[in-house]
Each structure stands twice: as structure tokens, then as C-alpha cells.
Image (cartoon, rainbow, N blue to C red):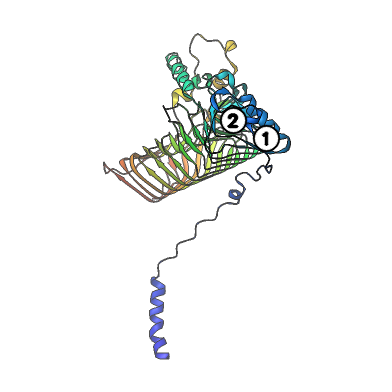
């Protein structure tokens, strides 16, 4: 027995010394992750059928007042506003505390194509506080509200798209590209503003006149299983998918977006007005989502003024999206984008999988008043856009960003990361990344990057060019 043990001991020791290293367990989520999403949902089960309040499901009768009556009735006791199958034309409706708006399968809410059916009210649009048409569905200053079901909300946005393009021709010719988006009033499809404990689940939203889902100045919001389709019967300009704007503890998961601008986007105000408000977008979890057409799978900016921080985006897939992981700002925005983790990402035919710039779209980002205008006669939102910030205030910062476990095929440029001489891309980690594409791209004005397993297979066989950078650990 002893002789057998003596033979086995060296073998066991050798096996122990040559055993594969144990895979480290995934890092635990930070504590804030558990705090994301709605903490309560409306408890009332009584149903309020909109047809009992005068709604007609013919796709032609304007049902705004009838649907609002049902909502108001449900709000008195708490309950579920619901619909028989059919198409319901409506203008702006306003949900209230304790109400669930249920859109069953076979139900379509059709947005009115007449702007007068969307009353003007104070809001924030593309980073500027101003008066703007109400959304089709509004959750404003409420707590404990839900929208559920497998039905569809169709913004019928094409007249608003056409209006925008007609104005673009006129404004571009006058040197007013920077203000046309703010003058071309177009209704959003769904807005959650100054609200908490809001649950959005299951519905399909399509053909938004402007942004689709806007979560503004709110906390504890869940968007789960939303489907967004804004390229039905055309390509709607600025039809972002889900915009999380100066909001906190937001959970977005299992969503599928095909739009014509940023798909999943974080914002925090722009320029002088955004710096005045100074509210961050923070504590945000986006997971297990899919993007088709659109300008960005996961975007931070360009409205960065209040700061974007404490964000995890994971388990995301993109096919045919223009850009993948996108950080963008401008030199009059200010704000810091930091503590961002993006992991477990798959991309196919995405033009640039990783892209960062602090000088995005100058014609749109920088406001210059052409000759022939006087300050005294300008609209208030023009004055906000023209208000100057100091160079120090306007300088954005990107730091402490980790991108890991990313696979991308069919790219044109693998990486395009551009800092500024006076604001470098600071302390980034790229880990376990494989990208195939036409060119490798560049990293410029960066500092303190840790790059572990960046495998770029470029058709031109050139490596990623690193310029004007320091303390880069490959």
C-alpha cells in the first residue's frame, strides 16, 4: 500500500502543477444594479374598456377624449385601461398614478397626423428645455404606472418626417442647420418625465414622428421586451429608439430596435442649458437587447453636459447598425462620461464597432447666428442654443471605460477613438476583442489604456494606429 502511494504522490503533484488555471468567476455586479427598474407596479385589477367611454375602433374617429376619460376613471380607484381589437386614432393621452394601459394583441393606437392634437407644453428636447408638443403617450409627474400588452403604437410619423426634410433644405441654405431640429416640432411617441416606478413592457412602437421612447428626469423605470420599428414605409429622421435622459436607476432589457438614429442612447443635456440644469444620467443597466438599422447600438451623447456615469450595457447584438459602441460629444457640451462597462457584444456588418469623438457633427453642434438676425427678436430656444460657455466649461471628458468580450465581423473600420489635446481618452480597458473589417482604424489622444487581447483582422493588414498617446499598455 505504501509503495503504491509512493508511486501516486509524484503523479498527483505533477497533475496539480499542470492543471488548467481556474476561470475566475465573473465580477459581481455593483450594488446599484439591484436598484434599477421599477420597484412597484399598479395593483388595481378593475378594467376600464375604452369603448364604454365612447372610443370607436375604426382607425378614423379621433378617440383622444374617450381614451382620456377611461384613464381618468381608472385613476380614481386604480385599474387597467384596455381595448377591444381594432385601430384607435388618438392624439396625446396622459396616464396617471395607479393606472395600467393595456394594449392587447390585435390593438393598434394610431397617432394623429395633425400637430394640433399634441398640445404644447414645457419639456426638454435634444438637450434643451423648451416648449414642445406633448407625446402621443405621456407619463408626466406620476408614480406607479404601467403600459403592457402585445399591441402596437403606430406614430404614423411620415408627415412629420416630410416636414423636417422640407425645413432642412430651407434652413441648411441659411446656415441654420444647428436649430432646425428644434424648430421642426415633431411629437415623440412615448415620454416618461419627472416620474418614478414606471413599467413599459411587451408593446411594439413604430413610425415615430420623432424620438420613440424618451425617459426624462425620472427614476426607477423598466423597459422590457419593447419592439421598435421606425423604418416601416420610409426612414424617419431622428427616430431614436430609447433615450435615457438625465434619469437614474433605469433598466432596459430584452428590447429589439430598428430605427433611423441612435438605438439605445444615454443623454444629459447640451451646451449652456444642459450645464445650467446639470443632471446626470446614471445607474443604468441595458442588457440582452438587439439592434438592426440605426446610428448606434449603444450611444453615450452627444448631450453629455450633466454627465453620464455608472452604466452597464451587456449581452447586446447588432446587425447592420451604422455604429456600435459610440461615445460622442462636442467642445461646447462639457460633462464627463465615466464608469461605463460594455461587455458580451456581437456585431455583424456594423460600420465602426467602437467609435469615440469629442467634436461630433460640427454643423449641428456649434451654433452661429447668420447675418440679418437680431438677438431681441429671437425665440427663447434660439437664445439658449446661442448662449456661450467658456472653453473650460465646454470641454467634455471620457474616462474609466471598459469594453470586453466583443466580436464583430464585416466592419469598415474597427476602431475610431479620437480624444482632444486638452482632453484625452483616459483610462480605457479593451479586453478580449475580435474585429474583422476593411481597416483597423486609430486611437488618437489617449492615455493610460490597458489593451488585452485586441485582435483586429484588417483587409489592408495594417494595425490600429496609435498617435499622440501615452502610457498605453498592450
Q: Looking at the image, which is closer to me, 32 or 288?
A: 288
Kindly identify the residue that appears in the image at 27 percent across and 42 percent down.
Answer: 459
Q: Nearer the viewer, mark 2 or mark 1?
A: 2
Q: Which residue, given by chain and number where applicable, does mark 1 sit on?
A: 142
- Mark 1 neighbour class, 10 Å CA radius: few under 14, some 14 to 19, many 20 or more: many
Kindly identify the residue that appears in the image at 45 percent across and 27 percent down.
Answer: 236
Q: CA distance from mark 2 to mark 1?
A: 13 Å
Residue 169: x %, y % from top left = 42, 16
Q: Are marks 2 and 1 in contact (CB under 8 Å)?
A: no
Q: Residue furthest top?
A: 372
Looking at the rendered structure, the secondary structure element under dot 2 is strand
> How many tags in the picture?
2
* Vertical position of residue 464 compared to residue 328: above or below: below
Q: Which residue, given by chain and number where applicable, does mark 2 sit on?
A: 137
Kindly identify the residue that appears in the image at 40 percent across and 72 percent down.
Answer: 17
User: In this image, 362 relative to 387: left or right?
Assistant: left
Q: Earlier in the sequence, mark 2 or mark 1?
A: 2
Amino acid at each position: 500500500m505504501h509503495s503504491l502511494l509512493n508511486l501516486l504522490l509524484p503523479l498527483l503533484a505533477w497533475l496539480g502543477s499542470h492543471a488548467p488555471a481556474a476561470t475566475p468567476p465573473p465580477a459581481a455586479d455593483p450594488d446599484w444594479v439591484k436598484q434599477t427598474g421599477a420597484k412597484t407596479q399598479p395593483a388595481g385589477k378593475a378594467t376600464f374598456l375604452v369603448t364604454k367611454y365612447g372610443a370607436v375602433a375604426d382607425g378614423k374617429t379621433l378617440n383622444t377624449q374617450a381614451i382620456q376619460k377611461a384613464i381618468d376613471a381608472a385613476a380614481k380607484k386604480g385599474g387597467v385601461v384596455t381595448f377591444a381589437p381594432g385601430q384607435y386614432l388618438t392624439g396625446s393621452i396622459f396616464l396617471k398614478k395607479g393606472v395600467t394601459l393595456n394594449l392587447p394583441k390585435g390593438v393598434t393606437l394610431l397617432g394623429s397626423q395633425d400637430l394640433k392634437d399634441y398640445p404644447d407644453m414645457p419639456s426638454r428636447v435634444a438637450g434643451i428645455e423648451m416648449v414642445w408638443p406633448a407625446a402621443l403617450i405621456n407619463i408626466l409627474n406620476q408614480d406607479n404606472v404601467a403600459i403592457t400588452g402585445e399591441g402596437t403604437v403606430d406614430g404614423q410619423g411620415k408627415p412629420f418626417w416630410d416636414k423636417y426634410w422640407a425645413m432642412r433644405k430651407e434652413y441648411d441654405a441659411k446656415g441654420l442647420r444647428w436649430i432646425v431640429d428644434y424648430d421642426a416640432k415633431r411629437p415623440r411617441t412615448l415620454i416618461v418625465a419627472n416620474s418614478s416606478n414606471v413599467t413599459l413592457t411587451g408593446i411594439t412602437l413604430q413610425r415615430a414622428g420623432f424620438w420613440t421612447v424618451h425617459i426624462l428626469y425620472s427614476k426607477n423605470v423598466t423597459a422590457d421586451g419593447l419592439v421598435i420599428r421606425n423604418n416601416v414605409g420610409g426612414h424617419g429622421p431622428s427616430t431614436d429608439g430609447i433615450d435615457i435622459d438625465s434619469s437614474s436607476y433605469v433598466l432596459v432589457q430584452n428590447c429589439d430596435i430598428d430605427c433611423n438614429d441612435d438605438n439605445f442612447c444615454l443623454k444629459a443635456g447640451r451646451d449652456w442649458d444642459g450645464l445650467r440644469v446639470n443632471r446626470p444620467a446614471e445607474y443604468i443597466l441595458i442588457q440582452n437587447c438587439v439592434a438592426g438599422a440605426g446610428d448606434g447600438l449603444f450611444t453615450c451623447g452627444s448631450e453629455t453636459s450633466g454627465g453620464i456615469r455608472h452604466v452597464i450595457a451587456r449581452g447586446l447584438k447588432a446587425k447592420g447598425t451604422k455604429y456600435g459602441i459610440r461615445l460622442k460629444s462636442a467642445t461646447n457640451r462639457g460633462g464627463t462620461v465615466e464608469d461605463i462597462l460594455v461587455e458580451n457584444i456581437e456585431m455583424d456588418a456594423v460600420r465602426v464597432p467602437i467609435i469615440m469623438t469629442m467634436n461630433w457633427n460640427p454643423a449641428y453642434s456649434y451654433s452661429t447666428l447668420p447675418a440679418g438676425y437680431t438677438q431681441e427678436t429671437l425665440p427663447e430656444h434660439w437664445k439658449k442654443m446661442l448662449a456661450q460657455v467658456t472653453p473650460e466649461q465646454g470641454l467634455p471628458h471620457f474616462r474609466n471605460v471598459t469594453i470586453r468580450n466583443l466580436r464583430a465581423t464585416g466592419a469598415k473600420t474597427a476602431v475610431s477613438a479620437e480624444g482632444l489635446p486638452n482632453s484625452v481618452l483616459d483610462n480605457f480597458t479593451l479586453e478580449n476583442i475580435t474585429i474583422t473589417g476593411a481597416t483597423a482604424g486609430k486611437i488618437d489622444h489617449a492615455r493610460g489604456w490597458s489593451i488585452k487581447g485586441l485582435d483586429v483582422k484588417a483587409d489592408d493588414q495594417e494595425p490600429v494606429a496609435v498617435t499622440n498617446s501615452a502610457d498605453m499598455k498592450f
